[in-house]
Amino acid sequence: MSHATQDHATLSKQFNKDEARVNWHDETLWFVRQKRDKMAFSLSEWELLRGAASAIKDNVLSNLHDYLVEFEAKAQQNGVHVHWAANGAEHNQIVHSILKNHGVTQMVKSKSMLTEECHLNEYLAKNGVEVIDTDLGERIVQMREEPPSHIVLPAIHLKKEDVGETFHQHLGTEKGNKDPQYLTEAARQHLREKFLTRKLALTGVNFAIAETGEFVVCTNEGNADMGAHLADVHIACMGFEKILPKREHLGVFLRLLARSATGQPITTYSSHFKKPREGQEMHIVIVDNGRSTQLGRADFRNSLKCIRCAACFNTCPVYRRSGGHSYHTAIAGPIGSILAPNLDMARNADLPFASTLCGSCSNVCPVKIDIHDQLYKWRQVLVQEGHAPLSKKLMMRGMTFTLSNPKVYRLGGKIGRWALRNAPFMVNNGLNPWFSQRDMPEAPKESFREWYLKRQKE
Amino acid sequence: MKVGLFVPCYIDQFYPKVAIATLELLEKQGCEVYFPTNQTCCGQPMANSGFAHLTEGCNNLFIDNFKDCDYIVCPSGSCTLHIKDHLHSEKQEASAMQIRQKVYELVEFLTDVLKVETLDAHFPHKVGLHQSCHGQRGLHLAQMSELNAAPFSKPEQLLRGVKGLELITLARKDECCGFGGTFCVFEEAISVKMGKDRVADHTQNGAEYITAGDMSCLMHLEGILKRQGSSVKVVHIAEILNAI
């Protein structure tokens, strides 16, 4: 990851250098939010569905151990190999060992944010394995050597001109041709050859059913199915929170997922995988990678309810204007900002502050995660754990002293207002980030308190 | 009925006319309004920055100032929400909990406690209503666009009763302005961009004034309007409701 050293504020500032592009990004994602509204509000039971989904996930999180063991047993009965990975490194090694056992050095992968989280592509590349992402958006960002900027729409930060240029470089399409149909056809031909020749396919998992050992993969392009059906070996990787107790619960989640994500009633493909077909080998890798730590944090365990719909991305006024890469983590947006500090507090200490706490995220969330409250709580944890910059600490101590002492507050206010009126250069200068694009308020001669005391005397 | 007037620090210092309008408005409704003169700030700037552990002094000061009031009314949804959600004290926890129950944002105090239907106010202008997030999503002063639920709006209900006032329709009726407390300086680029986009929505739809229940949002939008040299002004909802 190339962005590790710069924080959200810095990366956002860079993104905002091209304001027209920011406007386009904002409008594009707002359009998705509006599609979501239209689809969600067409169901009178929408809020009940959210409540049901949230309650089912509460049950899952409270009984996770039992459900996982049940799922493993059922999957094994179905003839599936089940692997457990404590962290990203173990996950990557497990995948690599399966590849080695089959003598495979080329594979296809369909969209899996978990493998982004574990940095599987980089790991396999170092070990001489070529991975082709088959989701169109993922393939585009892979060619550009960029991480996805959105968990559902990985290349949403790119315009068709950008895609045309990328395909010209990598697939030899005509220079300057940005016709979506032409470009899609080029991708189709390119990917078809990969599907037909790769012996191993990796997919993500949207839902894993404890009672049957099945898993469900949701895509719009059918690329997961194409990969899995043509390959001799299918590996499915899942975070351990993907469990649902029963098949009947899918009815709640499948109705919520695509409506929340893209404003569709359901994904084009909701594929159920149960057992390997004859001659095929099927593996499931169940990954912890910090999830049990998060499960143990009472204030944050709810974040594990996430079904990765990205509705919180699309509604977030900050995300729409800062772009996914400004979050420098595999999962961006508001949900990423409450997941990432769990994985690495020092590296992601800026993310819970990349929000105005407007609360829109918590209210679009189909599983009712209290995202904005968790952002507030993460801020407290990060400061207590020593991840606040010194300048901010000093500023806060100064404010605390002033605001805890009425006389100091009143004197400070008087001096500040005097300075604004008589020596505005002391305030309106390059050291004041407010002033760089905004005027300061006009400073009145008297405060409300001063006015009030005068009135009391009259 | 003893009503304690809770004036946010930045209103006390920069927008005294908003507090004056609030005071007059409540007095016109027959409230006995009391302004505790030793008040400073609710402590939200520290708490939202992750320094809630430093707010003990502010919290105790707030409790000392307001514990004897029947109601506490504030012309800010954000400061009200902070007190409602986070006021806490090692020394006087019972008082803190009582205060959390009796603190009200001005508009909800008018509509829910005083049961005001319309006010005798006159403001002959085209006005855009900015829904400040903490008031809307936190205090439920108005229905939010995210939920599949029946619409309502307490501020709109009062504004619709103001003579001569024409409420404009916005493209995005409840998007955040980007102020966000210390976010406005620590995430300056996004804060300003969000503010510019809100301002554009109001100006393109013909607003002469932008109003809100929170002066902090309006201070941010005013800063942008002034920098742009715009003729559009900001006005707190208390000033409109108190305008004759």
Image (cartoon, coloured by chain):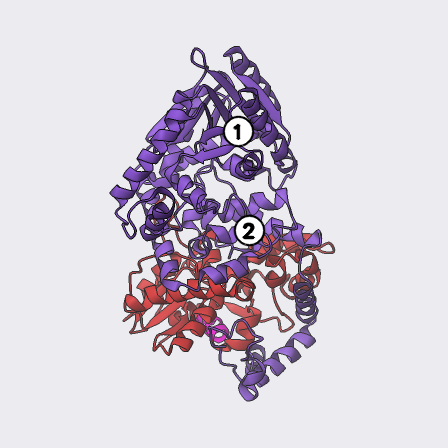
Establish if A80 lies above or below A62.
Answer: above
Q: Amino acid at mark 2?
A: Ser
Establish if A142 lies above or below A55.
Answer: below
Q: Is residue A151 left or right of residue B60?
A: left
Disc 2: CA contacts within 10 A as few (<14), some (14-19) or many (>=20):
few
Q: Secondary structure at mark 2?
A: loop
Question: Residue placed at 49% from the left, 56% from the top?
Answer: B134
Q: Which numbered dot is residue A2?
A: 2
Could you tell me how far apart the alpha carbons at marks 1 and 2 are, in whole angstroms?
26 Å
Q: Amino acid at mark 1?
A: Met
Task: Decide whether residue B15 is among the magenta residues.
Answer: no
User: Which numbered disc, 1 or 2, marks the residue that appears first in the sequence?
Assistant: 2
Q: Are marks 1 and 2 on the same chain?
A: yes
Q: Quadrant of the C terminus of chain B?
A: bottom left
Q: In the figure, what tint was chain A given? A: purple
Question: Residue placed at 35% from the left, 40% from the top?
Answer: A262
Span of residues in magenta: B18-28
Asked which quadrant contains residue B147, the reply is top left
Which chain is indicated by disc 2?
Answer: A
Q: Which numbered dot is residue A238?
A: 1
The chain that appears red in the image is B
Q: Nearer the viewer, residue A106 or A22?
A: A106
